[in-house]
Image (cartoon, rainbow, N blue to C red):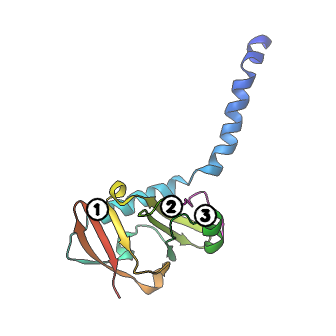
């Protein structure tokens, strides 16, 4: 029995280490779920309409941030004021990056190519918008992409 245990010791230790380290590199399941719900809500929009961002977000948030491509995770976390496993860097031009934050929690995160999530967002050069502003977006469609453009 002892010999069997010793032969599996390396595997057992590897599993324990993975279980301990993996959560540091994964966003929370709730954040992932809320991001998917946001994508679905945007995908159901009709072109030629306007929509409040609050109506697309079935989760709580105070501020929505966007960052330039190649902005490091460290710089993003400095801007939002805390670290989170839900923060991802946009590694290329043309990626949608939205980070919804409430307090010191990321409540939803989008960081992908528009064609992979079905939409693109134009914040008109703004780097953040707050829930209290009650932002409204015009909805258009180009090819198969829903385009959300912040109204002024």
Residue 90 numbered mark, or none = 2
User: Is the residue 14 above or below the residue 52 in the image?
Assistant: above
Residue at coordinates 22% horizontally, 61% vertically from top-left?
A: 143
Q: Which residues are magenta?
A: 81-89
Residue at coordinates 33% horizontally, 60% vertically from top-left?
A: 40
- The residue beneath circle 1 is 43
**Quadrant of the image occupied by residue 77:** bottom right
Secondary structure found at label 3 = loop
**Structural distance between the alpha carbons of marks 1 and 2:** 22 Å
Q: Is residue 62 left or right of residue 16?
A: left
In-front residue for pair 64/54? 64
**Farthest-out residue, front:** 93
Image quadrant in which the N terminus is located: top right
In-front residue for pair 67/102? 67
Majority secondary structure in the magenta region:
loop
Name the N-terminal-most of marks 3 and 2.
3
Secondary structure found at label 2 = loop
Residues at marks 3 and 2 touching, judged by CB atoms closer than 8 Å = no
Q: Residue 46: x, y in percent?
A: 21, 69
Residue at coordinates 38% horizontally, 63% vertically from top-left?
A: 38
Name the N-terminal-most of marks 1 and 3.
1
Q: Residue 146: x, y in percent?
A: 28, 66
**Structural distance between the alpha carbons of marks 3 and 2:** 9 Å
- The residue beneath circle 3 is 72
* Label 1 vs label 3, nearer the camera: 3
Residue at coordinates 70% horizontally, 42% vertically from top-left?
A: 20
Confirm whether the magenta stretch covers residue 56. no
Residues at marks 1 and 2 touching, judged by CB atoms closer than 8 Å = no
């Amino acid at each position: 029995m002892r010999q069997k245990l010793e032969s599996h010791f390396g595997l057992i230790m590897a599993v324990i280490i993975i279980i301990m380290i993996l959560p540091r590199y994964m966003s929370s399941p709730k954040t992932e779920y809320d991001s998917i719900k946001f994508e679905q809500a945007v995908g159901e929009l009709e072109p030629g309409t306007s929509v409040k961002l609050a109506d697309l977000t079935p989760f709580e948030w105070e501020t929505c941030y966007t960052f330039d491509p190649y902005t490091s995770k460290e710089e993003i976390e400095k801007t939002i004021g805390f670290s989170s496993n839900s923060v991802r860097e946009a590694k290329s031009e043309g990626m949608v990056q939205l980070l919804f934050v409430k307090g010191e929690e990321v409540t939803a995160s989008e960081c992908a190519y528009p064609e992979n999530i079905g939409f693109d967002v134009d914040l008109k050069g703004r780097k953040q918008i707050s829930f209290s502003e009650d932002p409204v977006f015009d909805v258009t469609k180009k090819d198969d992409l829903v385009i959300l453009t912040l109204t002024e």
